[in-house]
Amino acid sequence: MSDVLPFEIAKLSLAPGDVLVVRTPLREIHGSFEAMQKLGAMCREAAGIDCRVLILDSATDLSVLTRTEIEARAR
């Protein structure tokens, strides 16, 4: 893994309690706890705030279904 990774942060500011979500296609990161720890630390340093970092494979897709949406789909 390179010590310099290009990245974009879609949200311009992070507040305490926020979670920075990082999507990366780098396979060597996803199999290594140490590599994920290092990437998380690099992202926190770049963001300038001590926040939680969620590292996902770029093929991973997350979404949230609210209770209202679940109930509407069950009808």
Image (cartoon, helix red, strand yellow):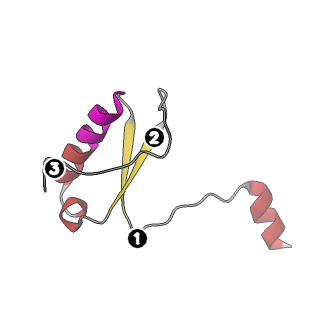
Q: What secondary structure characterizes most of the magenta part?
A: helix
In the image, the segment drawn in magenta is: 40-49
Instruction: Provide the residue designation for mark 2.
Output: 19
The mark tally for this picture is 3
Q: Secondary structure at mark 2?
A: strand
Decide: is 3 above or below 69: above
What's the amino acid at mark 2? Answer: Val
N-terminal label among 2 and 1: 2
- Position of residue 5 in the picture relative to residue 13 (left or right): left
- Residue at image location 79% in from the left, 71% down from the top: 73
Q: Secondary structure at mark 3?
A: helix
Decide: is 11 above or below 58: above
Instruction: Provide the residue designation for mark 1.
Output: 59
As for residue 41 lying within the magenta part, the answer is yes
Q: Quadrant of the C terminus?
A: bottom right
- Residue at image location 45% in from the left, 40% down from the top: 19
- Residue at image location 36% in from the left, 27% down from the top: 49
- Residue at image location 38% in from the left, 65% down from the top: 58
As for residue 70 lying within the magenta part, the answer is no
Nearest to the observer: residue 14 or residue 69: 14
What's the amino acid at mark 3? Answer: Glu
Marks 2 and 3, Cα distance to the nearest angstrom? 19 Å
Image position, residue 37 (x, y; %): 22, 45
In the image, which disc is placed on residue 34?
3
Nearest to the observer: residue 52 or residue 22: 22
Q: Quadrant of the N terminus?
A: bottom left
Q: Are marks 3 and 1 in contact (CB under 8 Å)?
A: no
- Number of residues whose C-alpha sits closer than 10 Å to that of mark 3, classed few (under 14), some (14–19) or many (20 or more): few
